[in-house]
Amino acid sequence: MKIVETQDVTTIRPLYDAWLAIANGEEFGIDIDPAVAEVNMQTLCEAGGTLLVAYDEDAPVGFFALSPMPSAIGNQTMAVETMWFVLPNSHLIGPALFDAARERARDKGHSHLMVTASRLASDLHDKVGRFCMQAGSKHFETVYLLEI
């Protein structure tokens, strides 16, 4: 497995398609459109965001996207998880992507890594929340903050 930073958002199109096949927002009624997601990811990259892609051999199996967010009340900039997706049969890649995101955010001078996971929204959100807490994050309303 390798994790690379890229601005070529087309590399994760197969993952958007997999996300669509798995969920398409059925649980929450959210429409997932891979074409829209790809355009939005390109906009994120062009605006200073970070896209990390995990590969197994040459195939993408997960990604973690970060957006910089200046604090409205201080002099810090946080790295906000915009999207985090891993193929179901590659779930062990998730923690490695989290660690890579934390390191990349630290390298860019961000003060915190913010991961969104509403408690009790779904089993997946609860698992993400527990993982974030185990990784040293603090629960703050609907996000988990990790000082880096």
Image (cartoon, rainbow, N blue to C red):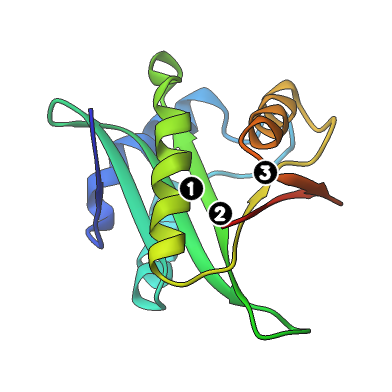
Residue type (three-letter) at the residue carrying disc 1:
Asp
Where is mark 3, residue-wise?
30
Packing grade of label 2 (10 A; few <14, some 14-19, many >=20) is many
Q: Quadrant of the N terminus?
A: top left
- Disc 2 or 3, which lies upstream in sequence? 3
Q: Position of residue 142 (x, y in %)?
A: 81, 49
Mark 2 → mark 3, Cα distance in angstroms: 18 Å
Mark 1 → mark 3, Cα distance in angstroms: 10 Å
SS for dot 2 = strand
Q: Nearer the viewer, mark 2 or mark 3?
A: 2
Q: Position of residue 98 (x, y in %)?
A: 48, 41
Is the Cβ of the residue at disc 1 closer than 8 Å to that at disc 2? no
Q: Residue at x 72, y 41 (%)?
A: 117
Where is mark 2, residue-wise?
81
Question: In front here: 102 or 43?
Answer: 102
Which corner quadrant of the image does residue 47 belong to? Answer: bottom left
Where is mark 1, residue-wise?
33
Question: In front here: 112 or 4?
Answer: 112
Which corner quadrant of the image does residue 60 belong to? Answer: top left
Q: Position of residue 45 (x, y in %)?
A: 36, 69
Mark 1 → mark 2, Cα distance in angstroms: 19 Å
Q: Relative to residue 74, is residue 60 depicted above or below?
A: above
Residue farthest toward the left in the current orientation of the protein: 58
